[in-house]
Image: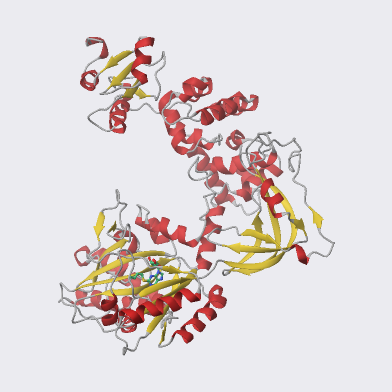
Amino acid sequence: MSDIENEVQELRRRIEYHNRKYYVDAEPEISDFDYDKLFSRLKKIEAQHPELLSPDSPTQKVGGEPIEGFEQVEHDVPMLSLDNSYNLDDLREFDKRVRKGLAKSENIEYAAEIKIDGVSVSLLYRGGLLVRGATRGNGAVGDNITANVRTIASVPLRLNGNFAPDVEIEVRGEVFIPRREFEKLNEMREAEGLQLFANPRNATAGSLKLLDPKTTAQRPLDVFLYWLHAPAHIMPDTHIEAITLIREYGLKTEPNTALFNNMDDLLEHIKTWETKRSELPYENDGIVIKVNSYAQQRALGMTSHHPRFAVAFKFPPEQKPTKVLSIEVQVGRTGKLTPVANLEPVLLAGTTVKRSTLHNEDEVKRLGIMVGDTVIVRKAGEIIPQVVEVLKDKRNGSETPFEFPENCPVCGTRVVRPEGEAVTRCPNPWCDAQVRERLIHFASRQAMDILKMGPSLVNQLIDRGHIKDVADLYSLDKETLAGLERMGDKSARNVMLSLEKSREMPLDRLLFALGIRHVGSRTATLLADAFGSLDAIAAATQEQLSNVSDIGPKVAGSIIEFFAQPRTAEVIAKLRAAGLKMDAEKKTSDTGTLNGKIFVITGALSRPRDEIKRSIEAAGGRVTSSVSKKTDYLVCGRDPGSKRDKADRLGVSVISEEELAALMIQEPSQIEFSFD
Ligand code: IVH
């Protein structure tokens, strides 16, 4: 081996060691500075000697190229879930069943582990190298998420120890995002105008299912392993020994695992953790109890769904009493009024809770909540905790009733609550609160992607009178921006640049950015494709809109309502003047043989309808869901329904699949049909 190869191997060995010390053992031995020195040395050599690069090098954890989709992975041993129990008596029953299933004389030990509320994964190491990461999926088949799993700091690309090249070791465990990191992640997303994750579990699942591993690498994922499957000569005799072995491999295990030989101590342990659970830096929702001996596990076996040797005791959701300091009513982007209780801060499930949503008027009535009340708040998976109960016997007469407002608390317009709906709305689209929220939405990454245009900047711009609507963003100048709080020359320049870039956004993004009620990004794409320009959408009738497949009367009505407002036309005129794209990019349809033709599909066909629809669209045609006078062709399969009759009545051409295929390859004018 050359000197340089030796150095690379030595560097990798040392970096792997220090990774383990830092990420797995939380006992770093060297300073970040010294670690960075090792790391950059290795990177430099690998850059100079690409032939020495290897996928298991610690430099390869930053995330590789994006992938198209996830391949399926079959689990050799199915990934089962556990039977749940919610009270301690259930656990005594579990113990009885276990004892019944084993010989009387046997001594039984139970391992108790904190049940992490994350996402279960399987990691496969071959010859000590990480070769596959997979989700649980349906237990039998999951997704191959190797590219993402490789980016998790505490997942080593190589196990500690020596392994024959074909030895396969599978470990399973729970990926999670620690509480503190989760809060930071959401704070960052809020500042960037991105949608917040509801809880660490959702954030974890989302991060593992990203198609771009570089984004996953940015997420603070961590993992605890609790299951081992290895060749017989490696497998120990007990679960606890397996946990030790997993640790020796350099993988993380939950540190509070304990072993018991009687039920009473085990139940005490559970009660203790029920009160201490919120002190753990990660979300947990119970205690998993497993028979420790593998021989006994095998003897007990499985039911069709669950192992008989293990059970999950689930903690009840955490709840605590606190005081209602005030109740305010917030107005959202679509004018929705949401009552929110400001609470005396209380530590709940590891985070400080200061507010709680009261949802709507009916919920306020149901709870009978007053300002000054003592209430029970509960956190069960959502970011904003719920008020579950008002402790009315704690009242001392100083409480003040809360009346749901009749006028919008922001603009004073009389609020409306349609018959039979739970939501109360401010009907004034130019209500300050709605304008602010719309601006934030307009600038958000999924919409026009304007940097930094989150709540702080938008509020300053509105409060100082620089902007009144989304179109005013395009008349901002660098000096104005640079003069705002927490902005400098550089930030101002970046905002200007991204404003500039946003003028090039395609029509569907602009349409989504306008924040029309019920028009999400998918609907926006459908509309842009179907009508081709903002003017055409604005001029469309309810019927024409509803003719676009997947657009129902509710969505169509909301679009009509939006464009009927006088200020909308004004804003659109300003956006047009600012040079934004008002027309859809011409797709292949320009030269498509079905250009501009409107199709309806009915009856049983040889291919799925969606597929036929896509090929029509690819050739420039449009597919709508119902037959009207505007329909050019009804593509008709076997057993057509009423659409066929309607087409006949309206004199719409009815064609077969073969005739459609012919249409696609020839100019429509050159082809003759026999219409029956
Ligand atoms: S054991 C056959 N141990 O809880 C063994 N699961 O339904 C199956 N979980 O899907 C799992 N912590 O996602 C086990 N220490 C632990 C666990 C644990 C969390 C999750 C896991 C599983 C679910 C149980």
How far from the left and from the top, in percent, is residue 230?
A: 22, 75
Placement of the N terminus among the 4 image quadrants: bottom left
Placement of the C terminus among the 4 image quadrants: top left
Residue at x 43% of width, y 33% of height: 525
Observer-nearest of 59 and 146: 146
User: In the rendered image of this protein, does residue 535 appear above or below residue 185?
Assistant: above
Q: Quadrant of ligand 1?
A: bottom left
Residue at x 63% of width, y 70% of height: 347
Task: Residue 322: name its quadrant.
Answer: bottom right
Residue at x 63% of width, y 37% of height: 420
Task: Residue 425: name its quadrant.
Answer: top right
- In the figure, is residue 201 to the left or right of 463? left
User: In the rendered image of this protein, does residue 291 appear above or below residue 81?
Assistant: below
Task: Residue 335: name its quadrant.
Answer: top right
Observer-nearest of 144 and 48: 144
How far from the left and from the top, in percent, is residue 486?
A: 63, 54
Observer-nearest of 364 and 188: 364
- In the figure, is residue 324 to the left or right of 70? right
- In the figure, is residue 276 to the left or right of 393? left
How far from the left and from the top, in percent, is residue 271?
A: 53, 79
- In the figure, is residue 80 to the left or right of 458? left
One can see residue 143 in this view: no
How far from the left and from the top, in percent, is residue 7?
A: 24, 77
One can see residue 567 in this view: yes
Number of marks: 0
